[in-house]
Image (cartoon, rainbow, N blue to C red):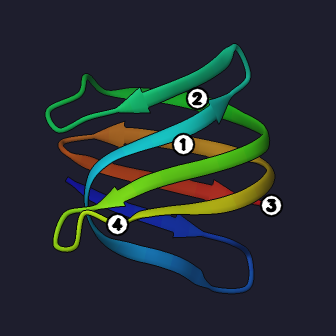
Amino acid sequence: MTLKIISAEKILFEGEVRSVTLPGELGQFTVLPRHASLVSTLVKGTIAYTASDSGERHTVEVEGGIADVDNDVVSVCIY
């Protein structure tokens, strides 16, 4: 599955991941491959993802944003 984390200034990450956990407005949620399509607002918290190639876990602190999941692509616009 492809994850794109984008801010107004730059692309923070774009690559293949095994999973991504996001701080949704109604609580933290995890997206796995073949997840159903969804759009969610994000609140202040941590985005955590596991890279497909290395299996390493990475985190990004965010103040909020929007996440869109569709066809194995997770697009996250943060601020």
Q: Quadrant of residue 37?
A: top left
Considering only order in the chain, which callout, 1 or 4, is on the residue closer to the N terminus? 4
Considering only order in the chain, which callout, 4 or 2, is on the residue closer to the N terminus? 2
Q: Quadrant of residue 17?
A: bottom left
Mark 2, residues whose alpha carbon is within 10 Å: few (<14), some, or many (≥20)?
some
Horizontal side of 17 relative to 14 (left or right) equals left
- Dot 1: element: strand
Residue 79 is marked as: 3
Q: Are marks 3 and 1 in contact (CB under 8 Å)?
A: no
Considering only order in the chain, which callout, 4 or 3, is on the residue closer to the N terminus? 4
Q: Which residue, given by chain and number where applicable, does mark 2 sit on?
A: 40
Q: CA distance from mark 3 to mark 1?
A: 12 Å
Q: Which residue, given by chain and number where applicable, does mark 1 sit on?
A: 67
- Dot 2: element: strand
Q: Give residue 78's position: percent from left, percent from top.
A: 70, 58
65 lies above or below 32: below
Amino acid type assigned to the residue bearing label 1 in the image: Ala
Question: Which mark's residue is nearer the viewer, 3 or 4?
Answer: 4
Amino acid type assigned to the residue bearing label 2 in the image: Ser
Amino acid type assigned to the residue bearing label 4 in the image: Glu
Horizontal side of 9 relative to 70 (left or right) equals right
